[in-house]
Each structure stands twice: as structure tokens, then as C-alpha cells.
Image (spheres, rainbow, N blue to C red):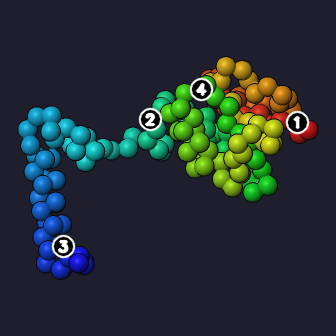
């Protein structure tokens, strides 16, 4: 009954959507604000765009300390703020490679303690602590 749209119709739709996007971008007032902000964004730092306040320097320092091995595991310990946790996971995946994140602190060889209520999660003991930022620590933990 329905098949793929003919090429002319598809090209017409693309052109219409492009024209609509340009029109909204140049429209006066609140309608164009989000598009203008997105189009005019210029990165000021080497950091990704985080939605929570993240200390990029501290994350890079921690990444430089972590051993460069796929056999290394780490856990992120922070406050119970979903966006902060989400951004820290993304930063870890970007700056801690090839180390592997784990879901439990007991499985980890290293813990990134980022503005957490306690230095380490319960049941985990520190072997060596590196201060990489204000209330930000990378901790080598004892196994077992």
C-alpha cells in the first residue's frame, strides 16, 4: 500500500525542512533563541559540554594516574545527583580509557571519589589516595 517516497518528494521535504529551520532561526523573539544558541556555540575549553558542574582538569589528572591497561577497573563514587553521575560516567568513558568501569565498588581496583559524602563507599578500603581536585580523589583500593 505504502512504499518509499519518490526522489522528488523526498528532496522537496528536505528543502522544506531546511527552509523552515532557517526561518525559525531568523524569526524575532523567543522562537529563535534555542536555535541561535546552538548555532552560535563556540567551545572555550578542551572539555566536553557537561550539564553538571564538572572539574575537567581533575578528571584529566585522574585519567593520567590510572594505569593504561584494559585490566584496570574503576568505580565512580559521588553524591546522589543523577545528572552529575551521568556526566561523570561520560567523562570516565572519555578520559579513563582503556580502564573499564564497574557497577560495584567491590569489583573496582580504583575509585574516583567526586564530591562524595564519604571518601569511599562502605566496605572499601584505601591503599593509596591521590587528590586531583577540590573534594575530588582518585583512590587505589585494596582488593578482597
Q: How many neighbours does mark 4 have within 10 angstroms: few (below 14), some (14-19), or many (20 or more)?
A: few
Measured from the top left, where is residue 99 in percent x and y? 71, 51
Measured from the top left, where is residue 73 in percent x and y? 76, 47
Residue at the location (55% across, 27% down)? 81
Mark 2 or 4, nearer chain start: 2
Mark 1 or 4, nearer chain start: 4
Q: Which residue is mark 1?
A: 142
Distance in Å between CA atoms under marks 2 and 3: 36 Å
Pick the residue in front: 88 or 122: 122
Q: Which residue is mark 2?
A: 51
Q: Which residue is mark 4?
A: 80
* Tag 3 and tag 1, C-beta contact below 8 Å: no
In the rendered image, the vertical position of residue 66 relative to residue 7, given as above or below: above
**In the drawing, what numbered circle is on residue 33?**
none
**Quarter of image, res 121:** top right
Mark 2 or 3, nearer chain start: 3
Question: Closer to us: mark 2 or mark 4?
Answer: 4
Amino acid at each position: 500500500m505504502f512504499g518509499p517516497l519518490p526522489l522528488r518528494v523526498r528532496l522537496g521535504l528536505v528543502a522544506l525542512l531546511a527552509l523552515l529551520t532557517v526561518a525559525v532561526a531568523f524569526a524575532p523573539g523567543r522562537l529563535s533563541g534555542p536555535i541561535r544558541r546552538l548555532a552560535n556555540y563556540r567551545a572555550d575549553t578542551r572539555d566536553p559540554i557537561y550539564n553538571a558542574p564538572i572539574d575537567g582538569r581533575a578528571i584529566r589528572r585522574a585519567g593520567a594516574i590510572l594505569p593504561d591497561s584494559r585490566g584496570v577497573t574503576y568505580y565512580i563514587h559521588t553524591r546522589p545527583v543523577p545528572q552529575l553521575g551521568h556526566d561523570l560516567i561520560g567523562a570516565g568513558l572519555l578520559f579513563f580509557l582503556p580502564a573499564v568501569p564497574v557497577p560495584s565498588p567491590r569489583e573496582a581496583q580504583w575509585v574516583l571519589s567526586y564530591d562524595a559524602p564519604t571518601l569511599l563507599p562502605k566496605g572499601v578500603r584505601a591503599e593509596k589516595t591521590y587528590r586531583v581536585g577540590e573534594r575530588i580523589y582518585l583512590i587505589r583500593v585494596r582488593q578482597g
